[in-house]
Image (tube, rainbow, N blue to C red):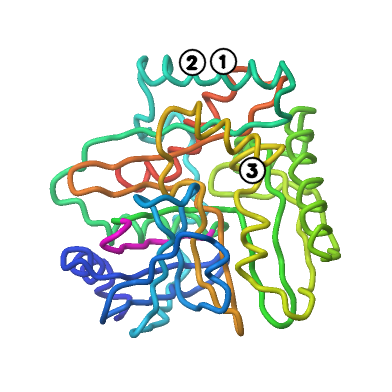
Amino acid sequence: MTSNDLDQQIDEMIGRGSSFALWRRPGEARIHFREQAAGEPRLFHHIGELSGRGGFVIAPFCVSPQHPIVLIEPTRRAEIAVAPSATAFAYPPEDGERQFPVSDEADFHRYALGFRRFHDALVARQVEKLVLSRQKEAPRHPGLSVGQAFRRAVDRYIYSYVYLCHTPVTGTWMGSTPEILLAGGREGWQTVALAGTQRLVRGQVPLEWDAKNRREQQIVTDYLHAQLRSAGIGARTRGPYPARAGELSHLKTEFHFSLPEGTRLGDVLDLLHPTPAVCGLPKADAYDFILRNEGYDRAYYSGFIGQLDPDGDTGLYVNLRCVHIRPASLVFYAGGGILASSVLEDEWRETGDKMRTMGRMFL
């Protein structure tokens, strides 16, 4: 596989139903490619079963018979060099850029009903934080090249983890996510607390953040501290600091740590997923509330994706800013953290901004 004909090869592999993944980590000048050319990918129904496994994994928000954890065990590998793109820093003025249609009146009405249910639970102090998400389905234009859309995302979103994954079980998913779930290897491990969202200001990361965004970020940070301590893991932290993700920015705190001898990676992943950035707190109560009240199936949105290597270089990311590419349609996903202080119109605008991350790749 070469850079010159990558677009065409991607489209051909999807057409013949191959199980494969491509990804580019933030700041890298290469695309990683893995394909399972023989046999079927492995399916798991509990995160803990990933211990000792290696390959590319795509896991859902809620594991179910319809949405299992899927592990591609590659038989074909390639590393593809990519040149820095001249468009990577070209953020046109919002008024001058074509906008992907992420909403209509019916979408807003549905979201507003969900917001009220979530907000009422927060005001009543049933939970401390909830994450409300939504999906938007759009027609797939004839002749769409998924390969070209992926290359555009790689070129534009140099600060994010950009991936494309296809299996017969999951279908085709593509995303650009800023949030590490678990990354590292023998030299050490990392996770992040990522919460709070603002648009860039004239292409720059804003330095001023309001109390709602700072509170949302602190909730996620405190949770990760507690989760790691419960497993006997002590972590060094850096942050919070503003971090760029595409045309948005977030508050980010890094956690760096070593794993105690004998720790199973699957158990660590089970400890971390789902993070408060996609679920809420307390974790179990928020998770149950979302499944009962959000009103749709998130599928692989807000699950996790990436390379799993217990002996080498693991890089797993939360599946945000993503699109499910179906034969006749595109389904975009986005969400945001809700607190008792949240305002409907602000949260609605934030989900629209996030959906446009992938929407722009299909204009």
The alpha-carbon separation of the residues under discs 2 and 3 comes to 21 Å
Q: Quadrant of residue 309?
A: bottom right
Q: Amino acid at mark 3?
A: Ala
Q: Amino acid at mark 2?
A: Leu
Question: Disc 2 or 3, which lies upstream in sequence?
Answer: 2
Report which residue position mark 1 lands on: 116
For the residue carrying disc 1, how many other residues have a C-alpha within 10 Å: few (<14), some (14-19), or many (20+)? few
Q: Which one is nearer the viewer's eye here, 240 or 16?
A: 16
Q: SS for tag 1?
A: helix
Q: SS for tag 2?
A: helix
Q: SS for tag 3?
A: loop
Horizontal and vertical percent position of residue 115: 55, 20
Q: Amino acid at mark 1?
A: Arg
Residue at x 77%, y 39% (from the top left corner): 219
Report which residue position mark 2 lands on: 113
Give the main secondary structure of the magenta stretch. Answer: strand
Q: Which one is nearer the viewer's eye here, 200 or 165?
A: 165
Q: Quadrant of residue 43?
A: bottom left
Q: Please state the total of marks drawn on the protein image.
A: 3
Residue 145 sits above or below residue 321 on the image: below
Q: Quadrant of residue 343?
A: top right
The answer to whether marks 1 and 2 mark residues whose Cβ atoms lie closer than 8 Å is: yes
Q: Give the magenta range.
A: 161-170
Q: Which mark is residue 277?
A: 3
Horizontal and vertical percent position of residue 352: 47, 31
The answer to whether marks 3 and 1 mark residues whose Cβ atoms lie closer than 8 Å is: no
Question: Disc 3 or 1, which lies upstream in sequence?
Answer: 1
Residue 167 lies in the magenta stretch: yes
Residue at x 49%, y 56% (from the top left corner): 88
The alpha-carbon separation of the residues under discs 3 and 1 comes to 19 Å
